[in-house]
């Protein structure tokens, strides 16, 4: 293996909906003359596995396989929305277009599609409709689409039961339209559900000159779909079946997710064992061009209501490598001299919780406010070690706030804006708060469900202890899979050491009249910076702010406002929580624009 150029962000605009992806070029001859297309799973699995798919593409490129990974239309950074019509047809067309782009870009005649879950179903459907795919790698792929819908529906039911009853003050959420599936914070509309339920790969016929090989991977011991295996064999393919151990680790929560390196090696070895005639065809191939994909676009334009917006990938150079983001701005007309920056929610990439940052950025750009959604070090497509975030404290380090400020500097240097609104959930709210304290260019911070405003290593243990994690009821939660045994054991180990230190530190601070949070809020007030908190039910920081008397003293800080979000899910997975969060973010932005009306001119934007 040799080094490869960094991956390049691309937009493929062959179809009705632009498709976003990353191309990982290879500088060595492709074994068997083969390029690789990675097709993602759906929803929460797609979010959690993102960094693993990025590393998989890099691993394949180093082995000589130029690789393209894409977001399906209506997902990730691609165009479209989940409620669009004809989603399955749009996804299928995206796979076909991506495979054809790969062939044009690399000069290679053979493409292998790696499909995970939904991605495998769509890759097979595209193949059966004539997409130029010569090899198949299918991981956790059922023969029937209704099996996927059934699995998502079960997941949704388990989510509903784990959320628990709402308080009497909370109104029940309005029902979703009939036959929609909402799972893990992501939605499939009724038409897409119906199309997937009607999809049976075992009833489709391969076109003439179709693929000759397929590799089916199980899912942590759950056997491959026997109907699919039999159908592929009956269609004349040489089918291999192998272990897919590591699927569960790949779709763990993003900060705990781990690359299935054994699967990487197994698939790489299988791809290298190309048929003899393919090897002969590849012998004349030269190294693939590390340049851009053929017919790729550096940016896209999208219609949002009556407005047209433009999205452009953006990088920010840092000592360790590059940060990555996507800048969304008006394509024409007037632009406010205020730019919004949406920060990662924990280790979730720049699309935000449940893709909310994509929807927000496009809506705000249509309103005239340029908006950047940003990946910080080790998250999404930014360089750096993602495994560091298995330690929660690594999300609350000053270097990440430094990176936010460096990004503001880059945006100002590019002439995007000189004043900024920061928004984030969880650790993203923490970075927003501290960047507002540090950087005079920040005029407001919108913070959804911040876990902490000042990090203390004993914070987790203190909260768990206070909430009674060690009670018998918590062991029932372990048996239901809601709390890991490791967390209980870690708390039992840490609590005797962490809690006394935390209580002693709090007593000493009170004795000396020190109040870090009060001082910070005073500074934000005195510099005229707007701070907006929004909390779901049962959030520990809100309980602490109330217990310690800050909420009773909000009149001391007229620049601070607070709202509540229905539901009790930290990452806003319920439909009603998302709807309410979108509305309060829009209100907060409008309030900022009204506060600054007349103080700053609008910039003219040309196409």
Image (cartoon, grey):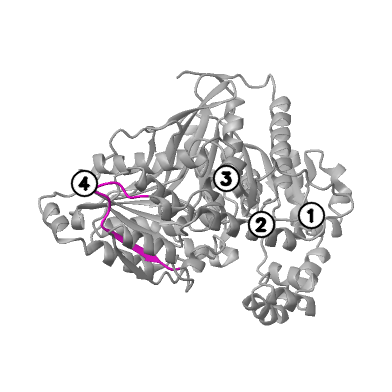
Q: Which residue is mark 3?
A: 194
Camera-side residue of 7 and 160:
160
The secondary structure making up most of the magenta span is: loop
Q: Which residue is mark 4?
A: 109
Identify the mark at residue 537; answer none if there is no mark: 1
x and y percent of residue 342 in the render?
A: 58, 42
Q: Secondary structure at mark 1?
A: loop
| Location of residue 295 (image quadrant) | top left
Residue 62 placement (x, y as % from top left): 27, 58
Q: Does dot 2 land on a helix, a strand or a loop? A: helix
Q: 470 or 338, which lies in front?
A: 470
Q: CA distance from mark 4 to mark 3?
A: 35 Å
Q: Which residue is mark 2?
A: 156
Spatial CA distance of label 3 from label 2 is: 17 Å
N-term mark: 2 or 4: 4
Quick one: label 1, few (<14), some, or many (20+) residues within 10 Å? some
Q: Residue at x 75, y 54 (%)?
A: 517
């Amino acid at each position: 293996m040799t080094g490869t150029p960094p991956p390049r962000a691309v937009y493929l605009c062959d179809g009705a909906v632009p498709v976003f992806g990353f191309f990982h070029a290879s500088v060595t001859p492709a074994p068997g003359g083969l390029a690789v297309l990675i097709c993602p799973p759906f929803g929460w699995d797609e979010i959690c596995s993102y960094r693993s798919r990025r590393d998989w593409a890099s691993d394949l490129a180093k082995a000589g396989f130029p690789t393209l990974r894409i977001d399906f239309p209506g997902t990730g950074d691609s165009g479209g929305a989940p409620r669009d019509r004809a989603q399955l047809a749009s996804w299928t067309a995206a796979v076909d277009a991506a495979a054809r782009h790969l062939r044009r870009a690399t000069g290679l005649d053979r493409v292998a599609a790696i499909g995970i879950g939904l991605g495998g179903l769509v890759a097979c459907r595209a193949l059966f409709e004539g997409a130029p795919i010569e090899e198949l790698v299918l991981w956790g792929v059922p023969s029937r689409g209704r099996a996927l819908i059934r699995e998502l529906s079960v997941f949704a039911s388990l989510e509903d039961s784990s959320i628990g009853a709402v308080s009497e003050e909370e109104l029940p959420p309005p029902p979703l339209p009939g036959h929609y599936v909402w799972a893990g914070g992501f939605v499939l509309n009724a038409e897409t559900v119906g199309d997937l339920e009607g999809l049976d790969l075992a009833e489709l016929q391969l076109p003439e000159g179709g693929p000759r090989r397929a590799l089916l991977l199980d899912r942590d011991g759950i056997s491959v779909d026997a109907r699919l295996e039999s159908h592929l064999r009956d269609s004349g393919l040489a089918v291999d079946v192998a272990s897919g151990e590591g699927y569960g680790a790949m779709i763990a929560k993003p900060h705990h997710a781990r690359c299935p390196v054994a699967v990487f090696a197994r698939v790489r070895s299988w791809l290298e064992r190309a048929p003899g005639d393919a090897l002969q065809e590849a012998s004349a191939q030269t190294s693939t061009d590390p340049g851009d994909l053929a017919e790729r676009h550096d940016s896209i334009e999208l219609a949002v209501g009556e407005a047209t917006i433009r999205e452009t990938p953006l990088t920010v150079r840092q000592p360790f490598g590059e940060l990555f983001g996507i800048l969304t701005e008006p394509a024409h007309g007037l632009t406010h001299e205020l730019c919004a920056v949406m920060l990662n929610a924990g280790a979730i990439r720049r699309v935000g919780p449940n893709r909310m940052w994509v929807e927000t950025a496009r809506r705000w750009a249509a309103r005239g406010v340029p908006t950047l959604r940003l990946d910080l070090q080790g998250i999404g497509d930014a360089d750096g070690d993602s495994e560091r975030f298995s330690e929660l404290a690594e999300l609350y380090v000053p270097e990440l706030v430094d990176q936010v400020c460096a990004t503001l500097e880059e945006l100002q240097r590019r002439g995007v804006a000189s004043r900024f609104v920061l928004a984030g959930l969880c650790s993203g709210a923490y970075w927003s708060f501290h960047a507002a304290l540090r950087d005079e260019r920040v005029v407001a911070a919108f913070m959804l469900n911040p876990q902490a405003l000042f990090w203390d290593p004993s914070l987790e243990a203190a909260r768990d202890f206070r909430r009674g994690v060690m009670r018998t009821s918590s062991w029932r939660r372990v048996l239901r899979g809601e709390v890991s045994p490791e967390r209980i054991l870690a708390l039992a180990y840490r609590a005797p050491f962490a809690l006394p230190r935390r209580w002693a530190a709090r007593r000493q601070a009170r004795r000396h009249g020190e109040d870090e949070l009060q001082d910070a809020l005073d500074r934000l007030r005195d510099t005229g910076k707007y701070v907006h908190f929004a909390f779901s039910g049962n959030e520990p920081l809100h309980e602490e702010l109330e217990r310690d008397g800050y909420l009773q003293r909000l009149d001391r800080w007229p620049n601070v406002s607070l709202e509540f979000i229905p539901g009790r899910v930290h990452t806003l997975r319920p439909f009603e929580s998302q709807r309410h969060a979108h509305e309060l973010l829009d209100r907060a932005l409008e309030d900022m624009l009204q506060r600054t009306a007349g103080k700053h001119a609008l910039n003219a934007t040309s196409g």
